[in-house]
Image (spheres, rainbow, N blue to C red):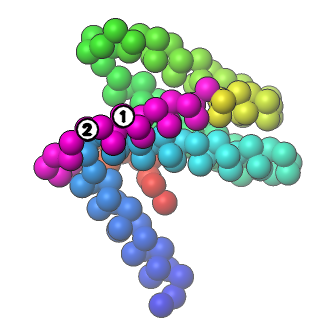
């Protein structure tokens, strides 16, 4: 099997995983990818590989933007605080990218990792429902 075929199959698998994921699972997938992007960005920043750092920071910004846009602040009391955190992280990621500031990237990891763990714990508490298509899956974020 050549590399292109393997990549195509991986992309197809990832797309199908996203399309069939529950809302709780989609949220945890977004957080997992967000922290993966930030880890890659941090490693690239430390190595001085700014193009790779920038690419990962931009993808992380897209994920935070998606999280912000899908947050309904009228649904629960803490949503406004979470929206404020997302806004702060978004600004910090822009600053980390523009100023090549690894400390800002690390700060974002420190803020988001506990949330990632909490969302995973919460997702385990939600009963699995029927599979459905999500609007997130049709976006441009990708999960490769």
Rendered location of residue 100, percent (x, y): 80, 34
- Residue range highlighted in magenta: 111-134
Q: Quadrant of residue 13?
A: bottom left
Q: Residue at x 30, y 37 (%)?
A: 125
Question: Splitting the image into 4 quarters, where does residue 70 fall?
Answer: top left
Q: Can residue 115 be found in the magenta stretch? A: yes
In terms of secondary structure, what is the magenta stretch mainly?
A: helix
Q: Secondary structure at mark 2?
A: loop
Task: Determine the residue positioned at 28% across, 51% down.
Answer: 21
- Residue 19: where, in percent of width, then height? 26, 54
Secondary structure under tag 1 reads: helix
* Picture coordinates of residue 123, whole percent (x, y): 34, 39
Image vertical order of residue 81 relative to residue 1, above or below = above
Mark 1 — residue? Answer: 122
Asked if residue 49 is positioned above or below residue 87 in the image, the reply reads below
Residue nearest the viewer, comparing 130 with 96 = 130
Name the residue: 80% across, 44% down.
45
State whether residue 134 appears in this view.
Answer: no
Query: Which labelled disc corresponds to residue 9?
Result: none
Q: Is residue 30 left or right of residue 61?
A: left
Q: Are marks 1 and 2 in contact (CB under 8 Å)?
A: yes
What's the CA distance linking mark 1 and mark 2? 7 Å
């Amino acid at each position: 099997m050549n590399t292109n075929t393997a990549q195509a199959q991986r992309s197809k698998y990832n797309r199908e995983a996203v399309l069939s994921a529950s809302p709780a699972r989609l949220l945890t997938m977004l957080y997992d990818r967000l922290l993966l992007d930030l880890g890659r960005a941090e490693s690239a920043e430390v190595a001085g590989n700014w193009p790779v750092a920038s690419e990962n920071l931009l993808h992380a910004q897209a994920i935070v933007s998606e999280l912000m846009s899908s947050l309904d602040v009228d649904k629960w009391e803490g949503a406004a605080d979470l929206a404020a955190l997302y806004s702060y992280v978004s600004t910090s990621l822009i600053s980390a990218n523009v100023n090549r500031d690894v400390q800002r990237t690390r700060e974002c990891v420190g803020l988001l990792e506990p949330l990632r763990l909490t969302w995973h714990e919460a997702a385990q508490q939600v009963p699995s429902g029927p599979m459905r298509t999500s609007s997130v899956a049709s976006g441009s974020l990708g999960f490769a």
